[in-house]
Amino acid sequence: MSGPNDFISPHSGKTRDTRTTMVMVLHHHQPAGNFDHVFEESQRNCYRPLLELLEGFPDIHVSYHLTGPLIEWIEQHDPDYIALLHRLVARNQIEIVGGGFFEPILAMLPPDAIKDQTRLMEAWIKRLFGGFDGGFWLAERVWETDLPLRLSGCNLTHTTVDDHHFHLAGFKDEDLHGYYRSSIAGEGVDLFPISAHLRYLIPFQSVEGALTFLNRAGEGKVLTYADDAEKFGVWPETFNWVWTEGYLRRLFEAFTRESSWLRIASMKEIRSERSATGIAMLPNASYPEMMEWAMSPGSSTALHNLLETLSGYGLRDAAMPFVRGGIFEQFMTKYPDSRRLYNRMLIASRLFSERVPKTAPDRDEIGHHLWVSQGNDVYWHGLFGGLYLSNLRHKAFDGIIGMENLLEKKGLLSPGESLLGDFDQDGSPDRVYYQKGYVAWLSISGGGCLQEIDDRQHCFHLTNTLTRQLESYHLKSSSGLNDHPTDGGSPAILSIHDRLPPPPAEGEIAFDPRPRRPFSEFLCHKDAGLDSLSGQSGKDPMVRDLGKAVWTLGEWDSSKAFFVTSEQEGESPWRLAKNYLFDPMEFTVGYRLTGGSLPKDHLLAIEFPVTLLVGSGEGRDLWIMPETGPSPTSPTTFGEWGDQQASGFRGKDNWSRATFSVSFSAPVRLVRFPLETVSLSEKGLERVYQGTLFLMMVSPELLESGEGFRISVSFENGE
């Protein structure tokens, strides 16, 4: 029987509720590679109490999303949670929404990967809950106009994007209710516009503030709240506010008390009872904060200043539809290490797509490793660590290397094989060498350096360091985009967007002139000190950066490569040759001056970045091979500074079991220093160890000798 707030919808023949409706979508998120204690604390302080509270309010209906890594953890550690979730789904209180299993940015994946990621999530939902309704979480709300076409055949029908997307397309707030249909080339998706007002009201301001805003919407209007579930107990100070002081219970009690005019519903309920509000063609966009974070520090600062100026004239709100930041893909140019990881993932994706048939019974077993590496967190940085977290990067590389090892195990990839192509899309060819003990990615651009060295025996990316670069929060302590809607009153607690710390003091952080990659080189004066070489002094020690020089490819094949560069210092031209030789468990890089001479007061500094996750710790040891004698010096740590004559060094990590050795054909000055970044996280600015840079300081005399100077890198056989 229909109630006083109902009428029959012409859309479906079902009863349509005429009350004001808030669609509630909760996104529960943990990335692959996060620490186990973070999963446990988030489950205890947020995810479980949230679901248990929902159980006590059966009239509050929500759309519910969990990322794949969190699903896998919960199934292993808290199966009772899954049982409770199943009960709430069975009584139609919760709509489980899908998407990419490891929460990738769908718009950046190859077509096959989109289908694999979404199929994996759909299969999990059907296995546990018996059916799938087509709703999905769009990772970081990264929308592109042709996304409906890319999602064709994925059984995805509806999702949420921000009101900002609609504002950029000319929509006004009063038009943003219900959901809109967006299509391209005959393929469509339904889009629920997320209210930024609700996003900043819940849970940061009073319950009354949220009710007042919803009451203003008007009878029959449908507004959407969609955001991270972590705001209910994981974000700073939220646990005390949400649970100890009872904010969320009060909110749910208020929703229930005001049920005569207000209901809380899932996306699928709204789609079942009403037609789309209209048609929308939205530009490529994400939420405003993300679009600011994707910009370069200078552009971000300029945007901040512009918004401050507009606010001063009372024009900010009117101007916002015409003022936009960057797009998510700009992270690939903002962060060279993000682009390197992304291209490495695409190399592995190409191998998987070409060599594993879609009908292969073990396809998911092989692909699961690769799909882990496609999760979005590790490719960008905003308020949380993201790309700056080495554990997330290592997890991604572990998946890539693990997938390639499985291909070899199944006879689909041969040791000694190499791939040729422009894998970083810079207009120059690259070659990836797959040897028994390691993978080496050789790039002509960037000075004929190695972009990557992987220990295949232990699935460990040995050169997984991070470029130390300027961030906008190094320049300022607030953002113009933080001037978000509050709808009156002071916030009960501050959102993390309002907690930006003051910038670091001058001299607290060093920056790299370019990415530090294995066997990039520069010339410096022989008396260059450790402070200068490390960047701590703020003075550039490079007389000439050969990492930016033009290196001519002489020859290369599946086991070797030969490069030459020619430069001139004053009136003295010179010609330097660099030769790579790749063997199963070792590779050698040789340098020799084949013409002219270098100034005698110069040194050739050869870079070798390496990381074992942390700079110090039990079982992570570094030995320096002395100038003379067979025995290495006592173990030191990767986080220590050093400057001494040496004939090589070796490292061992008991955690990953990776062991490597670097030896020189002749003793040279060996400089080492930690690569540390100062990056933003939910805890504020943090100094993070990203690796150690070794500099082999080679004299002109060694380079001019008959055999030149050689560096050998070897790996321990894991068999």
Image (cartoon, grey):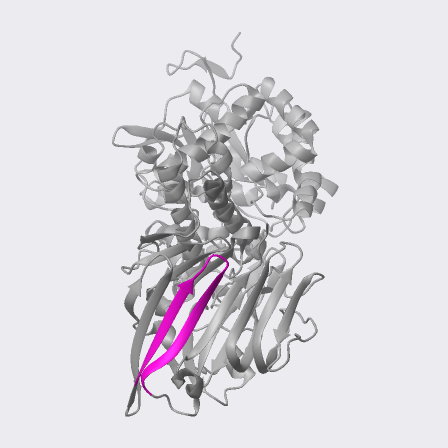
Q: How many callouts does the rendering have?
A: 0
Residue 216 visible? The answer is no
Q: Is residue 5 left or right of residue 445?
A: right
The foreground one among 664 and 232 is 664
Which residue is depicted at the point 57% across and 19% down? 92
Residue 172, position in %: x, y?
Answer: 36, 41
Residue 568, position in %: x, y?
Answer: 29, 85
- Corner quadrant of residue 42: top right
- Corner quadrant of residue 432: bottom left
626 is within the stretch colored magenta: no
* 623 is higher (above) or lower (below) than 213: below
The foreground one among 644 and 208 is 644
Which residue is depicted at the point 36% across and 51% down? 318
* 303 is higher (above) or lower (below) than 270: below
The foreground one among 691 and 470 is 691
Question: What stretch of residues is rendered in magenta?
Answer: 574-596
595 is within the stretch colored magenta: yes
Quick one: which residue is furthest to the left in this view? Answer: 185
Quick one: which residue is furthest to the top in this view? Answer: 1
Residue 696 visible? The answer is yes
Residue 643, position in %: x, y?
Answer: 59, 81
Residue 702, position in %: x, y?
Answer: 44, 84
* SS majority, magenta: strand
Which residue is depicted at the point 59% across and 63% down? 685
Q: Is residue 313 left or right of residue 40?
A: left
* 213 is higher (above) or lower (below) than 505: above
